[in-house]
Amino acid sequence: MDMRRLFIIRKDLHLSAGKLGAMLAHCAEGYWISLIRKNTTEENGRMHSSFDVEKEIWNYYLNGRITKTICEAKNLNQLNKAKKIALELGLVENQDFGMINDACLTELTPEWVDENGEGRCTVGIWFKPLKDEVAHSISKKYQLYKD
């Protein structure tokens, strides 16, 4: 059974190629960062992290057999529908998927303010490596990202 990384990025933000690349890098890192954050302790000024990864995900990552799919959401509402579908499938936010929120320091305009009073813009959503049929049950509502 194949596995897939699914990333969905908002199209209405008209990201430059560089910004799109940066946002996709955030998406790709999202799963691993979520694992590290939840499983890290500090001791003697050093950070220690230990976490479990499903054997199937580990094997696919080591063998380089995880397909990456980048889809587009027309706008924030359509992006939030992907989150809703994920929750309905039993996926857990910030564990199985997560939202990518930009700090709006370069080309984006803040759409909301976070708990620290900083302006943010929700750009995309990442998913952990999913079985193809699970990823497809989300991605079938979206088209592939294109210029």
Image (cartoon, grey):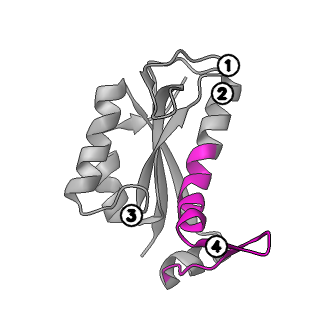
Camera-nearest label, 1 or 2: 1
Q: Which residues are magenta?
A: 26-54
Residue 36 inside the magenta-drawn segment: yes
Q: CA distance from mark 3 to mark 2?
A: 28 Å
Camera-nearest label, 4 or 2: 4
Q: CA distance from mark 1 to mark 3?
A: 35 Å
On the question of residue 8 being in view, the answer is no
Which of marks 4 and 1 precedes in the sequence? Answer: 4
Image quadrant holding the N terminus, namely bottom left
Which of marks 3 and 4 precedes in the sequence? Answer: 4
Q: Are marks 1 and 2 in contact (CB under 8 Å)?
A: yes
Nearest the camera: 5 or 122? 122
Q: Residues within 10 Å of mark 1 (few under 14, many from 20)?
A: few
Residue under circle 1?
106
Amino acid type for the residue under numbered disc 3: Asp
Q: Residues within 10 Å of mark 3 (few under 14, many from 20)?
A: some
Amino acid type for the residue under numbered disc 1: Thr
Residue under circle 4?
41
Residue 104 at what x, y percent from top left? Answer: 59, 22
Residue under circle 2?
19
The residue that appears at 50% across and 18% down in the rendered structure is 110
As helix, strand or loop, the secondary structure at mark 4 comes to strand
The residue that appears at 59% across and 59% down in the rendered structure is 33
Residue 134 at what x, y percent from top left? Answer: 32, 62
